Amino acid sequence: MGSLRMLLLVALSIVHLLDLGAALVSDAEWAAYKSKYNKKYTLEDANHRGLYEKKVVLVRNHNLKYEKGQEDYFMKLNEFSDTDQKVLYTYRSTIPPPTDPDNDLDARSDIPKNYTRYDDIKGGIDWRDHGYISPVGNQGTECLSCWAFASSGVLEAHLAIKAGRLVTLSQKHLVDCVPAPNNGCYGGWVSVAFNYTRDHGIAPMESYPSYQPKTDTCRYIPTKSRKGAESYYTLKLGDEKELAEVVYNIGPVAISINHLYQEFEEYGGGVLNIKNCTTERIRLTHSMLLVGFGTDPIRGDYWLIKNSQGTSWGEEGYLRLARNAGNMCGVASLAQYPVIKNEK
């Protein structure tokens, strides 16, 4: 009996080791991943590989549940899969959220006469269909410049709505030039960027050096910049109905969410729903551009959001986040858009 039991234990151990081995990444696979995203490590290689191997297991196990219909979204590996975003944001971003007052919808001066209230909205909207949304950008794995991508993206969309044509704006101008409390690749807030463009304008992409994931000396040239936001509005805290109304009637909105969850980091497609995802403004860590909303026939209501982590992430760089799900991850906790007037 003793020898039989020992053989059984050995067999189980072998099965366990084989299972772990199936989840690990071969040298060739790791080399291919680094080559695909031009990653070069020396002393840090083992650490990044360990993180990547954990993500491989996470993605595999989650997608088994998705295939069984137990999840509304699937995961996939991306450029950020060998990094720990929680560590990066914890140690690099130290900027507190703004304390702007929430603006009363009915008191705003930019509400159109044919403004459609939430209960009368049929279907949804996707501002990409109007040609007012620029291609997905990539902030890089070590630069917390999401605020610059969200700011430039919402500005160019509202400028395009006013002028009838899209001109892509420079995120790098904002990263290099917007002063404190924003801090380039160490984080910042959309509202601070709005105020900067009110006073200085914002450079088109073609007139400012191309984006690099680092903060450089400001090379702003006033004569080559477009006008920015004359002012901006902060929507009512947590009000998803008002947020939908503004997106539908006025245009895209810059939002910030709590994104420090593996579900977000490895999101591949579907409608993301993160259980117990916090919504407080103090917890918001990542700014993005809300370009629309709709309803999936199977997975329900969603927000359509443009990220700045390249097209390998999510649905070609976009996220569908659960809508009308208790202000998922704070999507309506700090929603803001610029006021643009008399653009020619």
Image (cartoon, rainbow, N blue to C red):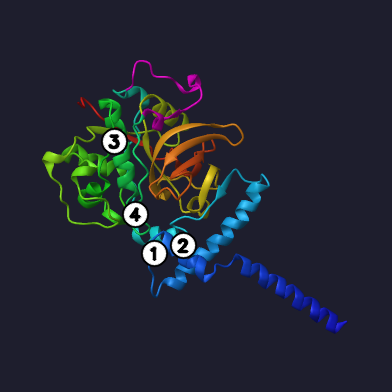
Q: Nearer the viewer, residue 1 or 107?
A: 1
Q: Outermost residue, right direction?
A: 1
Q: CA distance from mark 3 to mark 1?
A: 31 Å
Task: Give the residue at mark 1.
Answer: 39
Question: Taking 94 as reference, is 240 above or below it?
Answer: above
Precedes in sequence: disc 2 or disc 1:
2
Number of the front mark, 2 or 4: 2
The reply to whether the C-beta atoms of the residues labelled 2 and 1 are less than 8 Å apart is yes
- Tell me the crowding category of disc 2: few under 14, some 14 to 19, or many 20 or more residues within 10 angstroms, Cα based: some
Can residue 126 be seen here? The reply is yes
Task: Give the residue at mark 3.
Answer: 156
Relative side of 264 to 69, left or right:
left
User: How far across and down, in percent of the image, does residue 97 sit?
Assistant: 34, 47
In the image, which residues are magenta?
A: 111-130
The reply to whether the C-beta atoms of the residues labelled 2 and 4 are less than 8 Å apart is no
Residue 98 located within the stretch drawn in magenta: no
The circle drawn on residue 33 is 2
Task: Give the residue at mark 4.
Answer: 144
Q: Amino acid at mark 1?
A: Lys
